[in-house]
Amino acid sequence: MQNNISLDRLKIGDIVKILSIDSIDIPAKFFELGFYPGSIIEIKHKAPLKGPICFNILENNSLIAIRHAEAKLITAAYI
């Protein structure tokens, strides 16, 4: 049984698998960096006051920061 959660609700150090991206407004650069359904990511940093969230894409060891509002649109599951 998977516990689905949006990326904005994760804690630093959590490792999850991206399940779905619920918006077509996510920039194409995320996909180019490996940030797509099926990717395994780790939460590295969270800025206070609903600021950006930084993720490490474990597949290619890339760091990517996204807005809190974008993170709400992405669903993941703990692995």
Image (tube, rainbow, N blue to C red):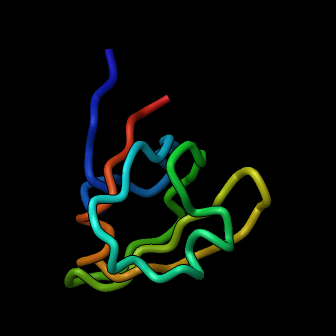
- Image x and y of residue 42, in percent: 56, 53
Q: Please give the name of the residue rendered at 28% of the width and 82% of the height, measured from the top-left corner.
A: 48
Q: Does residue 39 lie above or below 53 as drawn?
A: above
Q: Does residue 50 lie above or below 78 as drawn?
A: below
Position of 49 with respect to 20 (left or right) is left
Foreground of the two, 42 or 35: 35
Q: Residue 3, located in which quarter of the rendered image?
A: top left
- Image x and y of residue 64, in percent: 58, 76
Q: Please give the name of the residue rendered at 20% of the width and 84% of the height, measured from the top-left corner.
A: 49
Q: Does residue 49 lie above or below 12 as drawn?
A: below
Q: Residue 1, located in which quarter of the rendered image?
A: top left
Q: Please give the name of the residue rendered at 47% of the width and 83% of the height, measured from the top-left corner.
A: 27
- Image x and y of residue 6, in percent: 27, 53
Outermost residue, right side: 60
Foreground of the two, 36 or 7: 36
Outermost residue, top side: 1
Q: Please give the name of the residue rendered at 59% of the width and 82% of the height, measured from the top-left corner.
A: 29
